[in-house]
Amino acid sequence: MDRILFVLAGTPVRVLDVLLVGGAVALFLLLVVSIILIRTSRARGAEAGAAAERQREMDDKMAELNRASAELAGRMQTVAEVLGSRQSDLARLVTERLDTVQHRVGQGLEQAARAQGENLGKLNERLAVIDAAQNRLNGLAQEVIGLKDILANKQARGAYGQGRMEAIVR
């Protein structure tokens, strides 16, 4: 180990010196590699931490979105139920109103038919009275024509006058 391997700048280099320098270089390289590995692992740890933080944030946002979606679905279901009940209420009200209107129209038509029947009955009575009066007028017109014929003939007029006088005297 004390043997000189070579001379460098006038200094003899021994095996022990080479081993010491080699060990120092190896130790230095080991230290550099360790520092690089530590920094890399810290960077990876920081990246992993940041990635984990981003993942956690994304998970939180997804959970919030899922919660909002479930809430929205619940509200939509509630709105659908309310609209369904409102529609059935509206249909019921329309049916009730339609029944009421039909009942009123039916009563109105019935009253109108009854009143029209009564009016037609009264009209028939009046027409019967007018017809009877017309018949009497026709009879009276015939009698007036007969009287006119009698009064137009002098002989018949005299006989008529005499008959009337006799009727008065008696």
Image (cartoon, rainbow, N blue to C red):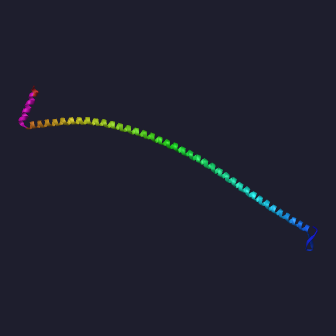
Is residue 96 magenta-colored? no
In the rendered image, residue 163 lying in the magenta stretch gets the answer: yes
Q: Nearer the viewer, residue 60 or 8?
A: 8
Q: What residue range appears in magenta?
A: 153-166
- Picture layout, residue 165 above or below residue 103: above
Residue at 44 percent across and 40 percent down: it is 97
Left or right of 134? Residue 118 is: right
Q: Nearer the viewer, residue 65 or 97?
A: 65
Most prominent secondary structure in the magenta stretch?
Answer: helix
Which quadrant of the figure contains the N terminus?
A: bottom right
Q: Which residue, as the protein is rendered here, is positioned at the far right?
A: 2
Q: Among all residues in the image, which is located at the extreme top? A: 170
- What residue is rendered at 10% in x and 37% in y? 149
In depth, the one of 1 and 149 nearer the eye is: 1
In the displayed structure image, the side of residue 149 where residue 131 appears, left or right: right
Is residue 91 left or right of 58 when viewed as pictured? left
Q: Residue at x 50, y 44 (%)?
A: 87
Q: Is residue 65 left or right of residue 102?
A: right
* Number of numbered markers: 0
Kindly give the residue lying farthest to the bottom in the view shown: 10
Q: Residue 155 appears at what percent x and percent y?
A: 5, 35
Q: Is residue 168 above or below residue 54?
A: above
Residue drawn at x 16%, y 35% as measured from the top left: 139
- Quadrant location of the C terminus in the rendered image: top left
Seen from the viewer's position, the closer of residues 121 and 34 is: 34
Q: Position of residue 90 (x, y in %)?
A: 48, 42
Q: Position of residue 127 (x, y in %)?
A: 24, 37
Quarter of the image where one finds residue 81? top right
Q: Position of residue 143 (x, y in %)?
A: 13, 35
